[in-house]
Image (cartoon, rainbow, N blue to C red):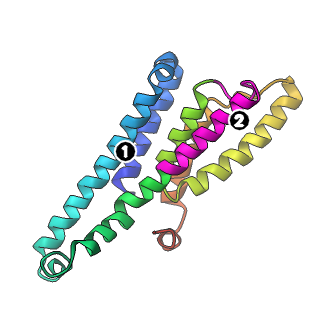
Amino acid sequence: MLLTDKVALIILFVLLGAQFVLRSFLFRYRNWIRWGIVAVILGITIYWSGYQYFYWKANELTKSFLPPYQGIGYFAYFVFTKFIGPWLIALAVSLLFEWGAKALNRRYEEQFFEAEEPALIGIGVFLSGWPGFLIYVPVVLVFGAFYTAAYNAIAKKRAPLYFLWLSFAIFAILIKNLWVPTDLLAHFNL
């Protein structure tokens, strides 16, 4: 399991606990929390990029991939595709889902989500990472649809999905790292 996935799991468990204890704090500081999480994850990827540079520089064979033997473009491409790019894709998709949830909720007069849920959706998508959000989104949609239909049939009101978003992000990371074959994940590299 990558360090970014371990950190994402820790963050998700902390946020899930905070949902029970510090709900108003999460709501009030959701934007700071989200961008703090993005900074932490991208900081880790930048650290690993620097580590990769010095690792290659120390080896006689791999230092030929770096300047002055090679242009910096090869190293930048490698680092982007292996470390930074997947998280930027996850960030873009998370912002898209968060924006979509806000727009849908606004259009239908707050019928779908509580006020802080779009931010939780975005955090869940982002921390699931690439290709983890390809597991996260379908699982949340399918389970959420069945749960909502059953809850609506029994209680005749909107299903509470508040605790679903971060829980399923944990689930998606665990599936990605424990059950999906590494060979299959290799096909999802940029």
Disc 1, SS: helix
Quadrant of the image occupied by residue 55: bottom left
Residue 56 is covered by the magenta coloring: no
Which is nearer the eye, 41 or 70? 70
Residue visible at 19% across and 80% down?
70
Q: Which residues are drawn in magenta?
A: 91-114
Mark 1: amino acid: Val
- Crowding at mark 1 (Cα within 10 Å: few <14, some 14-19, many 20+): some
Which is nearer the eye, 74 or 123? 74
Residue visible at 51% across and 16% down?
24
Side of 26 relative to 65 (left or right): right
Taken as a whole, is the magenta stretch helix, strand or loop?
helix
- For discs 2 and 1, the disc positioned in front in the rendered view: 2
Which is nearer the eye, 14 or 100? 100
Q: Position of residue 17 (x, y in %)?
A: 48, 27
Q: Which quadrant is the C terminus positioned in?
A: bottom left
Residue visible at 20% across and 59% down?
50
Q: Position of residue 154 (x, y in %)?
A: 87, 27
N-term mark: 2 or 1: 1
Residue 98 is covered by the magenta coloring: yes
Compared to residue 12, the image places residue 136 above or below, namely below
Q: Position of residue 69 (x, y in %)?
A: 14, 82
Side of 117 relative to 39 (left or right): right
Disc 2, SS: helix
Quadrant of the image occupied by residue 86: bottom left
Task: Verify CB contact (< 8 Å) between mark 2 and mark 1.
Answer: no
Q: Which quadrant is the N terminus positioned in?
A: bottom left
Label disc, if present, on residue 7 of the rendered structure: 1
Q: CA distance from mark 2 to mark 1?
A: 31 Å
Side of 47 relative to 186 (left or right): left
Mark 2: amino acid: Leu
State the residue position of label 2: 104
